[in-house]
Image: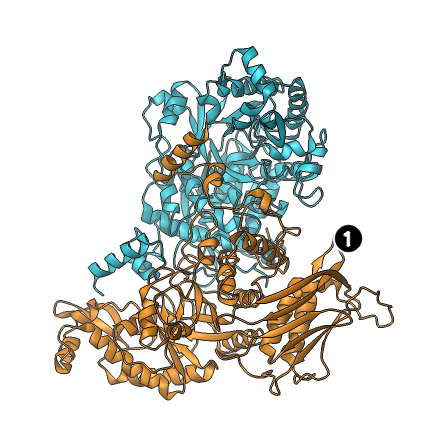
Chain colours: A cyan, B orange
């Protein structure tokens, strides 16, 4: 078949939704060619790409027996900073393999082209070592790889964590298996302060090990927010101390499919040690079917004609008991989760049940809402926001809450999820003066054939009509992996390296857009994740020097 | 938002290729509702569904300490049949867990409603215990679960293997964790003799462990053919004893990314013990870039004007050395792979390089082929088929070889891959009297959002215009998982349970088409695969009593 005919076959076959052998596709997709797979980027395997890099041809060797990561003498983070000690161990093991750990041999003479130390210097008087990361945390760092020492300089521990990851990405294995690093100067900081991943533990329960593995991978990609969509219609795995019946009745299983207070604490600390915020989402008044199982009268009884149908709708907004419950519940949440923000959801409220209920109708009439149920929704949300504000937390909400004209605090973060990469909603939200984060183009639960990471990569978050002031209100974005079709069996390879594309877009400079260079760096970055035990899926035909091995038959 | 508006939002949002939250989708997709997820099928978790089932309400208990699987006294497969012994152990462990293995306690008194034995009776004088499965192997069996013994009766060991899987699927855990089985009569046999899965080890190398795990899973789904697309353009991992330089030069790595003779032997024996044929594919004359690296002059030198361009095209069909090589190579293949068939490929030959080459043009003129390069392709294939025939093997070929009018042996199997579920090609191939297998609607490398298993499930392989005689020539089908986007990190969850849909279509009766019943059975079957250590992905929001745990962080 000649090329024209082949292309026709491609179109015909695709239009019938049928399969065809991939080599047809390969010819016409916008994909780097096979030859490019092993091509090198001049930036090696750095991901996400730092803001400023100077790399020299001079290289130094590193040996597991001599190389050390140490606190610089002048560092404000001393020997007691376990966050850094933990990170030193982690990156030492990533660079040399945990099996190769051995006693440091101080008597061994080191060679002339050997790098023996990475000194970590925290420059600000308060290192933040024992604190939690926040949206204003300083993640900048400067890395100088040169003799006699490499030096990593950062105002806060958060920047040091990012710089350690970068240093580990500079280390490569030469043809003889020796670890080497090129003389390099890097000055780096994130373009956006909020770089998140949403995981959904309601549609499918995710074992703690899976959550931790993905936090680990987030750190490898300089992601700094874990948006924990912890409960929803399908199940309520959060074990509340105040209302234990919520998970007792609402989880898929009351013991095996819940997150205990100890589990939650572990996730938060594991994340903190990697500079990752944990923002929990308790979405109301919709998406709450599972809440109703353990909390009587919380949900609206739906009616079929004049009688209750036995099914329930959104949270019942007309009862005082609802607000008493929410007050107690969010008081607990405000102490369990240290982050300054809670995500309150507020999306996709179905009005049909409210409409069917005579008590609701009566209340609507009393309030003068007419038949505008979005006013009832706003009534509920307004009171909920006041409750949460009284717990000293800020809040994030899905865009509908803003769209419905609910009165919001100036520091509210509006989460945009409807529409594509460039959409007017970003303009409207920022024109109203609100901070915003973007997820609309980054719904990673949607999958399609071939390299969809490129689509995520090509998004420019500030590509909407607005002033410079408005654009400053965009604090970042989140890749969302809703849970209908993922659980412990497939979540990790589906998320990585697709989410890595979002990670670079949110960290690196605006002009870092070369898709071929990205392909080359990301291919190596993906194999690095695999080597670190993460089953990150391939971009295209290729191989990793060490293939994924954790699969057990 | 009301429903109509929501639907509009859905369409608009989808048409911009953007993400949206899933609950919108859930309302309009043809999907079983959340409520159905835990609904029970009257057929329990049987997958694929047997041909005839009678199930009673009476149930018996099984205990790991008393229950045994044994050869029936009259069985033609005696104690020396290690294939069955191996299977007894495997299914005992699946039913009771390997951790619970313990000494059989002969003195313990068994209860009145306890089942203590499954007797396996091979009725044919030749059990086939030491043979290899083939397309004519008898896989039928009768299973009677009743007191005092359950009896599994099968003409050959192949049917016994299928029946053991079925028996293990009948065993369930009651609310107290006790294993139980209902009194049941099953009479079963496959609708199609050839039920295959294609895995591609060229685009990505698959470690042996991954191949074995998937063979194990094929057995759980009564799949009986592993179509091993072992080499292709991208890499040549097959280590040939006769031409070791092929993998030495053509594999991604000469030691870590090859299949040694011992590896291949292990795969074949592992498959045989599960009643699975291994059909290797060595695709020529196209798809052979990797062959050229280790075999000088095998590929056609492409020309740029009057000079060789340095690149190479398909196998060079005009040199005698080509046919000498193929003779030796396929002689080796015929001894290494015991199956009666070899897949010879023959798809997607690109004529541009042949056209550019002056020696080829001269040969074309000599032969009187004019400018019809498909005649040259046929010339090559014809000689190759003669070579393979001389090794006493039958062959399978992709449909283009048939389309191009190459003279084929009457027992050739034509593999249909272009088009959708019902296509004219099946009619043409069978009208010409050839045996055929269908893959066109089952290209599982294509992925899409939501429950695409339903699309695979709804295919009716005989849905083409043709006589009854023609339809008898359809011996089965194969689900193809081409390797561009899968490797050890993601292959298994992407294949299962999507391939299970194809497995039931090819095994069960034609009228087994109830999609809701299939959803319910498949949901439990998927959790059973997970419990057996296979990361089979979820169908939809749900949970498994025991979630996948093998993931290491």
**Circle 1 Cα neighbour tier, 10 Å, few/some/many (<14 / 14–19 / ≥20):** few
Residue B264 vertical position relative to residue B513 in the rendered view, above or below: below
Image quadrant containing the N terminus of chain A: bottom left
The chain ID associated with circle 1 is B
- B107 relative to A329 in the view: left or right: right
| Residue toward you, A201 or B149 | B149
- Residue B142, percent from left and from top: 63, 73
Which residue position is annotated with label 1?
Answer: B176
Q: Secondary structure at mark 1?
A: loop
Residue A349 vertical position relative to residue B523 in the rendered view, above or below: above
Q: Decide if residue A469 is in sight here.
A: yes
| Residue toward you, B10 or B327 | B10
- Residue A238, percent from left and from top: 65, 36
Image quadrant containing the C terminus of chain A: bottom right
Residue B456 vertical position relative to residue A271 in the rendered view, above or below: below
Residue drawn at the location 72% of the way across and 33% of the way down: A244
Q: Decide if residue A533 is in sight here.
A: no
Residue B523 vertical position relative to residue A219 in the rendered view, above or below: below
Residue drawn at the location 69% of the way across and 29% of the way down: A295
- Residue A125, percent from left and from top: 56, 27
- A41 relative to B374 in the view: left or right: right
């Amino acid at each position: 078949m000649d090329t024209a005919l082949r292309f026709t076959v491609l179109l015909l076959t695709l239009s019938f939704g049928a399969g065809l052998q991939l080599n047809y596709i390969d010819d016409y997709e916008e994909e780097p060619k096979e030859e490019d797979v092993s091509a090198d980027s001049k930036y090696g395997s750095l991901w996400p790409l730092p803001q400023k890099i100077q790399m020299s041809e001079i290289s130094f060797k590193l040996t597991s027996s001599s190389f050390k990561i140490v606190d610089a003498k002048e560092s404000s983070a001393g020997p007691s900073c376990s966050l850094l000690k933990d990170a030193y161990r982690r990156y030492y093991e990533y660079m040399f393999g945990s099996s190769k750990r051995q006693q440091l041999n101080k008597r061994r003479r080191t060679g002339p082209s050997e790098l023996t130390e990475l000194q970590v210097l925290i420059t600000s008087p308060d290192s933040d070592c024992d604190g939690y990361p926040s949206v204003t945390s300083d993640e900048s760092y400067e890395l100088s790889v040169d003799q006699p020492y490499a030096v990593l300089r950062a105002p806060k521990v958060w920047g040091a964590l990012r710089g350690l990851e970068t240093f580990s990405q500079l280390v490569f294995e030469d043809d003889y298996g020796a670890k080497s690093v090129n003389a390099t100067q890097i000055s780096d900081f994130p373009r956006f302060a909020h770089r998140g991943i949403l995981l959904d533990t309601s549609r499918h329960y995710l074992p703690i090990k899976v959550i931790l593995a993905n936090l680990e991978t987030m750190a490898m990609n300089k992601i700094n927010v874990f948006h924990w969509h912890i409960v929803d219609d399908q199940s309520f795995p959060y074990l509340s101390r105040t209302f234990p019946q919520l998970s007792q009745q609402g989880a898929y299983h009351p013991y095996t499919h819940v997150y205990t207070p100890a589990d939650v604490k572990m996730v938060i600390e594991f994340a903190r040690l990697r500079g990752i915020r944990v923002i929990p989402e308790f979405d109301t008044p919709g998406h709450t079917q599972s809440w109703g199982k353990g909390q009587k009268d919380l949900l609206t009884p739906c009616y079929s004609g004049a009688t209750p149908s036995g099914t329930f709708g959104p949270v019942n907004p007309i009862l005082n008991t609802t607000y008493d419950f929410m007050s107690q519940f969010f008081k607990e949440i405000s102490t369990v989760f240290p982050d300054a923000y809670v995500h309150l959801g507020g999306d996709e409220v179905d009005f049909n049940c409210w409409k069917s209920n005579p008590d609701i109708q009566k209340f609507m009439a009393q309030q003068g809402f007419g038949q505008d149920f979005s006013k009832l929704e706003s009534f509920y949300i307004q009171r909920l926001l006041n409750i949460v504000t009284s717990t000293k937390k800020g809040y994030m909400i899905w865009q509908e809450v803003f769209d419905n004209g609910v009165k919001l605090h100036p520091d509210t973060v509006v989460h945009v999820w409807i529409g594509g990469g460039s959409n007017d909603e970003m303009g409207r939200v920022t024109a109203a003066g609100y901070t915003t984060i973007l997820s609309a183009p980054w719904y990673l639960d949607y999958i399609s054939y071939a390299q969809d990471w490129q689509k995520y990569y090509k998004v420019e978050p500030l590509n909407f009509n607005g002033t410079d002031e408005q654009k400053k209100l965009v604090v970042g974005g989140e890749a969302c992996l809703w849970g209908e079709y993922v659980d412990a069996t497939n979540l990790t390879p589906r998320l990585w390296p697709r989410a890595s594309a979002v990670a670079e877009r949110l960290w690196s400079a605006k002009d870092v857009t070369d898709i071929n260079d990205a392909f080359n760096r990301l291919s190596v970055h993906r194999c690095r994740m695999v080597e670190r035990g993460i089953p990150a899926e391939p971009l295209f035909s290729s191989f990793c020097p060490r293939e994924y091995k954790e699969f057990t038959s």
